[in-house]
Amino acid sequence: MELQDEIRINAPRERVYAALNDPEILKEAIPGCEEITKTTDTDLEAKVSLKVGPVKAKFNGKVKLDPSQAPERFSLTGEGTGGPAGFAKGGADVELEEDGDATILRYTAKADIGGKLAQLGSRLITGTAKKLAGTFFTRFAAAVEDADAKT
């Protein structure tokens, strides 16, 4: 499965990049996120509860960031397990383009799933993934814009 989208965030690129590395902002933005811990400058661990169709599971996941082209671009890879519900693994390439005082965030994400989740059908999984991504970026933009307004 592959998802692509973009969102305009009313904050400078440096602030958006910093927020993408801030565990508190990420926890606020990730749907179902119960806990997120930054273990190194490039590694995160998270616990997320999600319901996808009839399957509800708690996922434990790890994410590795590649900031080598930051703040213009960066990529991330990750994987999570949800016990009998299955697993998910994938990655995303993110581009941050300055647009005056705002930033255009573009992403391309790819994911593979297995277990009970994979049995639900691609339309349900793709629809749920798009909804979760939309929720994340709406919450993320609001958190960044709110934090930027306070500075």
Image (tube, rainbow, N blue to C red):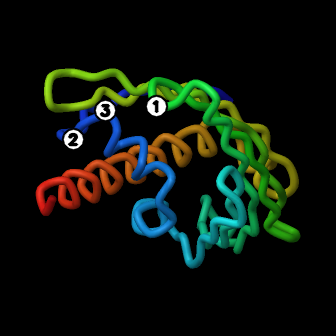
- In the rendered image, the vertical position of residue 121 relative to residue 6, given as above or below: below
Q: Can residue 144 be seen in this view?
A: yes
Residue 29 location, quadrant: bottom left
What x and y, as percent, mark residue 112?
78, 38
What x and y, as percent, mark residue 140?
35, 53
From the viewer's perspective, is the residue at label 2 or at label 3 nearer? 2
Cα distance in 3D space between marks 1 and 3: 16 Å
- In the rendered image, the vertical position of residue 2 relative to residue 138, given as above or below: above
Residue 25 location, quadrant: bottom left
SS under mark 2: loop
Residue at image point 32% right, 56% down: 139
Q: Is residue 3 visible?
A: no
From the viewer's perspective, is the residue at label 1 or at label 3 nearer? 1
Residue 11 — which label? 2
Read off the residue under disc 3.
7
Callout 3: few (<14), some (14-19), or many (20+) C-alpha neighbours within 10 Å?
A: some
- In the rendered image, the vertical position of residue 70 relative to residue 22, given as above or below: above
The amino acid beneath tag 1 is: Pro
Residue at image point 82% right, 58% down: 116
The amino acid beneath tag 2 is: Ala
- In the rendered image, the vertical position of residue 85 relative to residue 142, given as above or below: below
- Counting residues from the start of the chain, the first of labels 1 and 3 encountered is 3
Give yes or no for contact between labels 2 and 3 (Cβ–Cβ under 8 Å). no
Q: On the rendered image, what quadrant is the C terminus found in?
A: bottom left
* Residue 72 located left or right of residue 141: right
SS under mark 3: strand
Read off the residue under disc 1.
71
Cα distance in 3D space between marks 2 and 3: 12 Å
- Counting residues from the start of the chain, the first of labels 2 and 1 encountered is 2
Cα distance in 3D space between marks 2 and 1: 14 Å
* Residue 17 located left or right of residue 9: right
